[in-house]
Image (tube, rainbow, N blue to C red):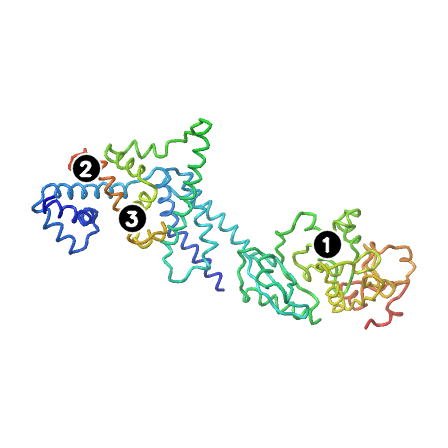
Amino acid sequence: MSDLDRTCREIEPDLVALGAGEAGGAETERVERHVARCAPCRDELTRYRALDGMVGTLREGRLAGEDPTLARAELEARLADLRSRVVHFGVYPSALGPILIARSELGVARVRYLEGGARSLAAQVREALGEDAVEDEEAVEGLHRELVEYLEGRRAQLDWTLDLRGARSGFQRRVLEATARVPYGAVMSYAGIARAIGRPEAVRPVAQALRHNPVPIVVPCHRIIGSDGALVGYAGKKLGLKERLLAIEGVRTEAGPGDPRVNRNRMYALQAGETEYCLPTCGSLSRQQLAGLTLFGSRRRAEAVGLAPCTSCRPDLHPLPEQG
Amino acid sequence: MVKVMAEDAFESIVAAHHGEIRRYLLRTTGRATEADDLSQETFLRAFRAFRGLPPDANVRAWLFAIATNLMRNHFRAQSRRRRAYAAVAVEPRGPDGRPEAQAESSEARARLEGLIEGLPLKQRLAFTMRKMHGLEYEAIGQSLRCSVDSARANVFQALRKIRRGLDDLAPVAMEPER
């Protein structure tokens, strides 16, 4: 192999670089010095330069199907949808244990009791919200403040806009909406909710729907009880929480042989469709099942929603003994 | 407030890079529908991962890396499908990728395109990122999960192969048309 051949081989990468417009000063100088006395490499360099020119033309040329307008519009729509589903959340300590609050662009999407202790909070949050949720306490700080006031009994209303797109079905959504209408300081039965949504036979499905309430407290499923007054169930096995939430609102429960229960004989009662509330002993109620009633823990709570005392049993003149 | 700003930032990323990423995918897949799907997927993934991106990251290189990764998976799946089809002797014939472009290009350009298409995938991607999109070798290395040197070597190998493929053309005929 001649010296020139060896030089040709050694210089080849620099020659390619120069032809492609990527050579530095030293390489350029070396290649130029070489091609001045080596015709084949000179030809090679010319070819690489010509190739670079062709590549440049290709780069500048139009591509078939290049117009991105439609693809872009479709992408924007997908992103908007994705964005509206992104939830921001915070986890706060509360009198009821750690609570997760999450909101989307549209409203509050999730409230959840977390378990302190064994399982990590992060894992529980992921389980509740998926991977894409963003921890952002600032975004839910106002909600948290109101919730604290509520749990301390200083606020009777959580006027939150809800994002119920996560509801499992239209049925669940109707159950949640009917439950949201049960006033502060009152209780109603699962059968009552089933009647309210026009599906009186669907008592168990109503209970199921509330068992998976995505926004407990805000949609007050704690105000829904069994037809015999028993609290029945809450957020898994958290009956104690249900009792405490009711106590905050002035609804007293009694320990029974089974679950704690609301004693309808110590509650004011409203019949569906009426505008007056009654004493439990009012004659008009005698054969009325709990499914047809809303029970109030105090006159104040009944009158807060615009109800008047019944003109025959006169709860205003003969109030029940104050609940403790 | 912070998140609102981040989302606006993502909008400007879409505005700045969607066209180019789609063009890259169009060049490498040769089909508008595939470029549409893969570019959409690229940006949806980017949107999900955007929050974890360091503020000083090279967003363009990052998007090329996501797109490249999706495309390579796409090609792998496609070749699996093709093998499966071949096994039952039904060769799928898709619509010609670039009829319009080929009709209007010179023979030399058509040959150049053919040579690029015939390159091994990694070289083709390295070449396209470097020569069609002017990406730095570092970014190309990130996209192809290889070193800077290897990225450069892939581009140079591609250049050599293309150059050899055009061997019979006189240098003059290779001159770009002006």
> What is the chain letter for disc 3?
B
Of labels 1 and 2, the one closer to you: 2
Circle 3 SS class? helix
Residue A38's spot in the image, x, y percent?
A: 9, 44
For the residues carrying marks 3 and 1, which lies nearer the camera in this image? 3
> Alpha carbon of mark 1 to alpha carbon of mark 2: how far?
77 Å
Which disc number belongs to residue A224? none
The secondary element bearing badge 2 is classed as helix
**Quadrant of residue B168 in the image?**
top left
Give the residue type at disc 2. Answer: Met
**Place of residue B118 in the rendered image (x, y in percent of width and height, measured from the top left):** 31, 37
Residue displayed at 37% across by 31% down:
B96
Look at mark 3 in the image and give the residue it sits on.
Answer: B130
Q: Are marks 3 and 2 in contact (CB under 8 Å)?
A: no
For residue A288, above or below residue A263: above
Which residue matches tag 1? A178
With respect to residue A251, does B22 lie above or below?
Answer: above
Left or right of A269 in this view: A206: left
